[in-house]
Image (cartoon, rainbow, N blue to C red):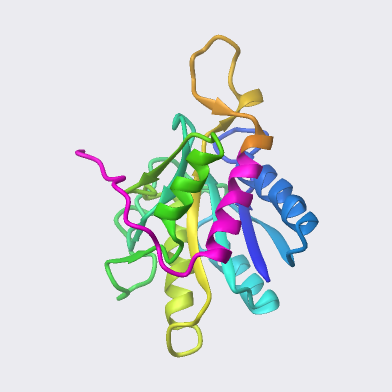
Amino acid sequence: MILLTGFEPFGGETTNPSWTAAAAASAILKADGHAVAAVELPCVFGQSITVLGDALQRYDPELVICVGQAGGRPRISLERIAINCDDARIPDNAGNRPVDEEVVPGGPAAYFSSLPVKAALEALRTAGIPAEVSQTAGTYVCNHIFYALMHSLETRLGAPTATRGGFIHVPYETQQVPRGSGTPSLPVAVMAEALAVVVRTAMSTTTDIRLSAGTLH
């Protein structure tokens, strides 16, 4: 079973491409013959973790990919690391605005994705989809759920599970961006195919490849 999640709209937006892309990717993967569930998460600190936890319990997936919107980024961002820090620049959809709080009190400082991010990067580039490995998922609800996911996979059965998981940021959807603004965006269909490529890569790759994808700053 594969679990994909995306977020509800936030910050005054009427849509969130992370959810529309995750739902569309679910349909693509089902057509491939995979068992897939897609779940929309609230853009709310704490509550999003509860909904994710319920989905993990219900579906007991072997692969989990959570998706969020990173408006302004030009590429599909394969997130490498989640940090144990909530520091919200804007309130979430319930008005919460934690500052310098831990996602999991007393938890490790960070967790690395257990997805084959370098192999996925290569596969995306081969497919002609703009992609990158990102070294930060921010400190808003996206990082919050990414950290909670990895912490859950590490501890929920009293020991690390065989389930692999990670987080992907997608740009704005093309229709969110005013024409001629120059703001980077991608069609939802491209985002959905990107997620399907990552899933296929993860399902066929147990050991990641070595590929330079770091940054200087």
Q: In the rendering, at what x and y percent does residue 26 appear?
A: 72, 54
Is 36 drawn above or below residue 139 in the view shown?
Answer: below
Q: What residue is drawn where x is 35% and y is 64%?
A: 112
Q: In the rendering, at what x and y percent does residue 9 appear?
A: 63, 41
Q: Residue furthest bottom?
A: 158
Q: Count how many numbered circles sit on residues in the image.
A: 0
Is the N terminus in the top left, top right, bottom left or bottom right quadrant? bottom right
Does the stretch in magenta take in 195?
yes
Does the stretch in magenta take in 214?
yes
Is the C terminus in the top left, top right, bottom left or bottom right quadrant? top left
Q: In the rendering, at what x and y percent does residue 210 appear?
A: 32, 56
Drawn side of residue 83 relative to residue 185, left or right: left
Residue 96 visible, this angle = no
Drawn side of residue 81 relative to residue 77, left or right: left
Is 192 in front, or is 184?
A: 192
Is 25 drawn above or below residue 216 in the view shown?
Answer: below
Drawn side of residue 22 relative to residue 145, left or right: right
Q: What residue is drawn where x is 55% and y is 9%?
A: 180
Q: In the rendering, at what x and y percent does residue 185 appear?
A: 55, 27
Residue 99 visible, this angle = yes
Q: What residue is drawn where x is 42% and y is 73%?
A: 151
**What segment is highlighted magenta in the picture?**
191-217
